[in-house]
């Protein structure tokens, strides 16, 4: 039962992260299918380990791994909300 809950939260966090990224890309007029995720400040292309929902934000204490500028709290909140809604 606990394992199913954890998997649902993880999958929901992934869906929330994806939906938020696509929303931001469409709002900026960028192609939402092609292209890679990047830091909104330094425009550095993010590595795969920078894209793990919730965990990457926590591991960097809410800062970009490359330029050290703050990442908004909206990212983990959207991911957590997606995870809890799916669970």
Image: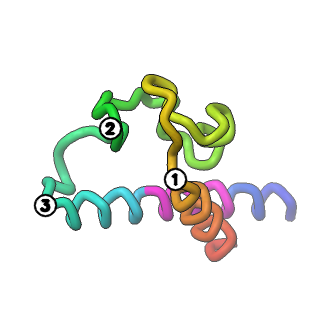
Across and down, in percent, residue 12 comes to 58, 64
Cβ–Cβ under 8 Å for marks 2 and 3: no
Q: Which mark is residue 72?
A: 1
Q: Is residue 11 visible?
A: no
Q: Which mark is residue 43?
A: none
Report helix, strand or loop for mark 2.
loop
Report helix, strand or loop for mark 3.
loop
Q: CA distance from mark 2 to mark 3?
A: 15 Å
Chief secondary structure of the magenta portion:
helix
User: First in sequence: mark 2 or mark 1?
Assistant: 2
- Asked if residue 10 lies in the magenta stretch, the reply is yes
Q: Which residue is mark 3?
A: 29
Q: Which residue is mark 2?
A: 38
Q: Could you tell me which residue is drawn at 22 percent across and 66 percent down?
A: 27
User: First in sequence: mark 3 or mark 1?
Assistant: 3
- Asked if residue 82 lies in the magenta stretch, the reply is no
Q: Could you tell me which residue is drawn at 48 percent across and 39 percent down?
A: 51
Q: CA distance from mark 3 to mark 1?
A: 20 Å
**Residue 82 location, quadrant:** bottom right
Q: Is residue 35 visible?
A: yes
Across and down, in percent, residue 87 comes to 70, 72
Q: Please name which of the two marks, 3 or 1, marks the residue nearer to the observer.
A: 1
In the shown orientation, is residue 40 left or right of residue 10?
Answer: left
Q: Could you tell me which residue is drawn at 38 percent across and 31 percent down?
A: 46
**Residue 42 location, quadrant:** top left
Q: Is residue 2 above or below residue 69?
A: below
Q: Relative to the observer, which residue lies in front, 34 or 66?
A: 66
Magenta-colored span:
8-17
Q: Relative to the observer, which residue lies in front, 87 or 39?
A: 39
Across and down, in percent, residue 58 comes to 68, 40
């Amino acid at each position: 039962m606990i394992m199913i809950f954890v998997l649902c939260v993880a999958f929901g966090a992934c869906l929330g992260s994806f939906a938020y990224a696509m929303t931001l890309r469409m709002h900026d007029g960028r192609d939402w299918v092609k292209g890679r995720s990047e830091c909104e400040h330094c425009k550095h292309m993010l590595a795969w380990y920078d894209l793990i929902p919730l965990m990457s934000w926590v591991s960097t204490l809410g800062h970009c791994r490359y330029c050290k500028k703050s990442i908004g709290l909206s990212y983990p909140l959207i991911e957590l909300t997606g995870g809890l809604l799916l669970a």
